[in-house]
Image (spheres, grey):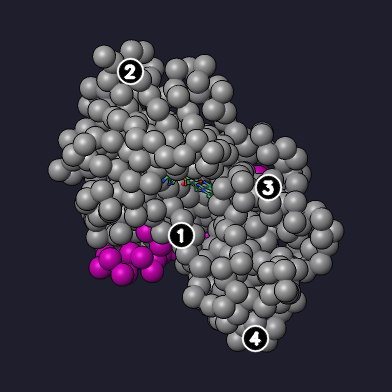
Amino acid sequence: MPERLAIVGGDAAGMSAAATARRRDPELEVAAFERGSFTSYSACGIPYYVGDWIDDVDKLVARSPAKHRERGVDARIHHEVLAIDLDARTLTVRDADGGGESTEGFDQLVVATGARAVAPPIPGAEAIEPARTLDAALRFRTQVEEAGGGSAVVIGAGYIGLEMAEALAHRGLDVTLLDQAPQVFGSLDPDMAAYVQEAAENVGIRVLLDCTVEEILLDGDSTPRAVRTSEGDLPARHVVMATGVRPDVELARAAGLEIGETGAIATDDDQRCRGAEGVFAAGDCVECHHRLLDRPVNVQLGTHANKQGRIAGANATGGDYRFPGVLGTAISRICSREVARTGLTQREAADAGFDAVAETVQTDTRARYFPGRGPMWVKLVAERGSGRLLGAQIVGSETAGKRIDTLAVAIWNGMDVEALQWVDLSYAPPMSGVLDPVLVAARATAKLV
Ligand SMILES: Cc1cc2nc3c(=O)[nH]c(=O)nc-3n(C[C@H](O)[C@H](O)[C@H](O)COP(=O)(O)OP(=O)(O)OC[C@H]3O[C@@H](n4cnc5c(N)ncnc54)[C@H](O)[C@@H]3O)c2cc1C
């Protein structure tokens, strides 16, 4: 009898695990259970689909269930896993298409259940479906198109709230973005976040900060009419709730898998669940090691989910791969500006007990005389004395953002800003000034450390 690998969750982490395991062991039976209608989809693309930069939801699907089946993975959509029995090595699965409940055996298991949205505990919140899956995105886009205009309120000004606000503004809606915090994009320092807020306001988004949401006012058919806030009632035909997510661990917890201090599933760096032979977990539902903070964190990003899924799939088939941890590198495009961060912000470095200095430089994305140049700001955080680079943030026009990757590699390898200012980075007028903004920022910061 061939061994059987079961996967719970059919997106980035789960299907990376499935595909990797099947590639490594063509004899292995691989069954993946997904409660939604899509597998291997890009949740990251949802704001661009809602905003109509992308017209067809299928373009966000990297591999359909049929394609997975062609490659030997038995991918089953509309199948929800209700329980995991680690002793019997079985799953209880409900087929939402009328197939009832069944018991599915496994030899190895990968838990990749992702994260779920956390709504504020206010009346009316239950009527707002979070746009986290393609099913939900399809419903939301249809609702926006059928209404044909009006006003929208986006609650939560993190990167997803900002991306959704931009999407709705792009559709011609009158958009208010609000947050109870005093700044947008809470994973940046406030001075850098101000450039993001400016970009949002420049496309007509009204930004309300220090604003508490109290109630979603609904019509009789449960569609939103307004949002009651500490700043008064805001008319809202559409409401987006982007108030954060938490790892979806209820199934894992009920099965007795260890939950770590972050509230996510605790795994070793080979993605094995502790004390559960042949059981792995990956993606948004797990915690992983932060290389600077030297403690577990739960970071919900597609890039980690893919890597961890691949590692889980490889190790479930006899591999020996390890996830090396994260630095909190992330990038987004908000209105006309690219926004990126890696390592620690100034505030995070202080909270973690580092004696840190920070410097921000403003430069241009291209040579000063070259058409199409725009402003960009680079903020570096470095350890006083040693000069070790601890963090970087970038906000700027097109082409600014991906420079964060150079800085992530520098932090990953423990570089200091003195050395960084002399690194051999490329130059041509359409791409940068003669000294790349990364070098300019490193030189300015080196003067402080
Ligand atoms: C709007 C938006 C924009 C984003 N933008 C970016 C970005 O630009 N860059 C980036 O790196 N990341 C981004 N992300 C985050 C990224 O999408 C996630 O980190 C990634 O999808 C995580 O993959 P995952 O497989 O761990 O979890 P998920 O993608 O959440 O997949 C988990 C799957 O498990 C299924 N499931 C859960 N429980 C069960 C069960 N009991 N039975 C069966 N199925 C179950 C769910 O239906 C879901 O499909 C974005 C997310 C959103 C929502």
Counting residues from the N terminus, which is met first, the one under dot 1 or under dot 2?
2
Residue picked out by circle 3: 138
Residue picked out by circle 4: 231
Query: Looking at the image, is mark 1 or mark 2 nearer the viewer?
Result: 2
Residue 427 marker: none
Give percent across and percent down for residue 422: 41, 42
Give the residue type at disc 2. Leu
| Residue 46 in the figure: left or right of residue 4 | right
Q: Give the spatial CA distance, label 4 vs label 2.
A: 58 Å
The answer to whether residue 384 is above or below residue 438 is: below
Residue picked out by circle 1: 245
Residue picked out by circle 2: 28
Give the residue type at disc 3. Leu
Tell me the element at label 1: strand
In the image, residue 141 lies in the stretch drawn in magenta: no
Give the residue type at disc 1. Val
